[in-house]
Amino acid sequence: MSDVSLTFPDGAKRAVPKGTTGLDIAKSISPSLAKRTVAMSLDGELADLYAPINTDASIKFIARTDKEALELIRHDAAHVMAEAVQELYPGTQVTIGPVIDNGFYYDFARDEPFTPEDLPKIEAKMREIIARDSPFSCDVMERAAAKKLFRDKGEIYKLELIDAIPQGEEIRIYSQREWLDLCRGPHMTSTGKVGKAFKLLKIAGAYWRGDSTRPMLQRIYGTAWASEEDLAAYLHQIEEAEKRDHRRLGREMDLYHFQEEAPGAVFWHPKGWALFTALIGYMRRRQNAWGYVEVNSPDMMERTLWEQSGHWEKFAENMYIAETPDERVYCCKPMNCPGHVQIFKHGLKSYRDLPLSIAEFGKVHRYEPSGALHGLLRVRHFTQDDAHIFCTEDQITEECVKLNEQMLSIYRDFGFDDVRIKFSDRPAKRVGADHVWDKAEAALKRAVEAAGLDYELNPGEGAFYGPKLEYVLRDAIGRDWQCGTIQVDLNMPERLGAFYIGPDGEKKTPVMIHRAMFGSLERFTGILVEHYAGHLPLWLAPVQAVVATIVSDADGYAERVLDRLKAVGLRAEADLRNEKINYKVREHSVAKVPVLLVVGKREAEDGTVSVRRLGSQAQEVMSLDAAVAMLADEAVPPDLRRAAKAA
């Protein structure tokens, strides 16, 4: 039998007989290594420790405490949960159970609905299965034999999954003692390695294969971690997230609502719209300072344009389409880029005109399954702070470096200092030739390196027209939110016939850099509300101050105070209702009004106000002039404050 060459993380090489397992190698090195190893990585891909190694590879042994093992812990926990469910509730079918961010789920087919009271029972059974410490084993089966196995077990959903496996691809069955499931793997060495740090979280409905015409299944969500400390921290984060849920806070702050007649579309209330327009005003000022020109493109354009751009081929299932009586087919725009190319094309452009930065607060429309909609965070109709920089290939690096600096500056202004960057390369579903993608990816990487940025590779997650950088913000309770993007596109300008005249007098195709900083303004609003738990900075607050009276004798003075606040540009209201002041304070605190100015007969006589801040029981009495000046200064947006300081 021939040998294969293995390269270890320290660079050492070792030849072993072909077919040797990872466990064999670990044992030959050290019994303690074999004992603590739960899986291995071959050329960067996780694999079962028991798997035979048949080709030369780089090898790394994975311990349960390694970060790479977390996905395996969750995957194994999903299998343990499925076994527990079938032990407790015979006749239940298991369907699909993947690992997701921070946990796992499994979809079950069962006539009787699960209830929250079932979750502790399932957890208890899971602990029994983990205590058995049953080894995981993998068998490769012929397609017909696998289908017979699951048909005989009454697992009809597995038959469809087997049919979906491409011909020639292995059909793997993983077992833990008598229980088994169809699975690609890999797994750790035994159920005992799951450990104690897991919890089942909730039950939800889910259509089979995400198709609303198919049967409704029952989904059980869970989470699993390497340690009980990590689990406790995550459960605390969930608790905090529930307190900060923008859907609840949106109601309490009277920002917006949704209704069935327009699913996935926001009905902005006056206070929510004040916040929304404050975001637009901020971004407009920044873009004007950076030399952008603002435009507006049509919401609906004919199908032929979307065919030329590539959207019809790659994105049609997400587009809203209408046919008019004259039999022309129109699409509500899912993206602003084709419209911006048309604006660029209007009038001859020279290389001297580049870079040309075109911006739009464009409303786009994308169909999302109803089950995917989630408040402001996942909608069907949303506004992007969209921009496209048309430039030469030589200008890509410089422009991307500038964009990165601008992006990070904006996030700092909104209280996000912890920002991670992901580099997303070509997806399977894309337009353009590979050599064009090679050039675009290389250009974007040069820009990242020139900016001195650390980034994480996000394989296959680029846009269908070009690679992109994704900016991921970490919020106040440690959650990550993907917001801004920078995308280098060498495909769409050529497809849509855009050109400029180069120094040699010849037509050249411009590079188009797609850029969104907030991303979706609706989504960014939801993120902001949750990040600040509704307690927004004064410059962003929809209502910055409320003047609340103690007695009706102070109504006239309260109205004069309100006029003074509005005169300096503050978004302020007066509460003159015949209610006790404590009631008013509670109500405005729930609505997250940052500042209350309480006035009674004494304040009216003295020309003062009692200032009370959100979240504080303390009150400060000060002159009306001082209070107005203080609040006017605090409400200055950070970009204007910097400009004033520089001036």
Image (cartoon, rainbow, N blue to C red):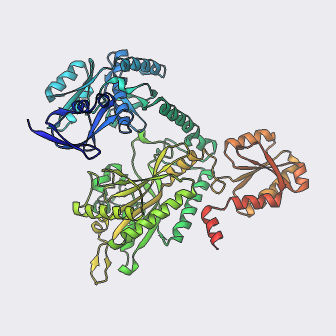
Residue drawn at x 29%, y 71% is 497
Q: Locate residue 421: give its quadrant.
A: bottom left
In the picture, the quarter occupied by the C terminus is: bottom right
Residue drawn at x 28%, y 36% is 40
Q: Is residue 174 left or right of residue 538?
A: left
Q: Nearer the viewer, residue 127 or 308?
A: 127
Against 451, is 22 above or below?
above
Q: Is residue 647 left or right of residue 21?
A: right
Against 138, is 594 above or below?
below
Q: Locate residue 431: give its quadrant.
A: bottom left
- Residue 85 point in image, percent of width and height: 37, 20
- Residue 285 point in image, percent of width and height: 56, 67
Residue drawn at x 46%, y 44% is 263
Q: In the displayed image of the protein, which residue is found farthest to the left?
A: 1
Residue 207 appears in the rendering: no
- Residue 347 point in image, percent of width and height: 37, 78
In the picture, the quarter occupied by the N terminus is: top left
Q: Nearer the viewer, residue 61 or 33?
A: 33
- Residue 372 point in image, percent of width and height: 42, 41
Q: Nearer the viewer, residue 346 or 422?
A: 422
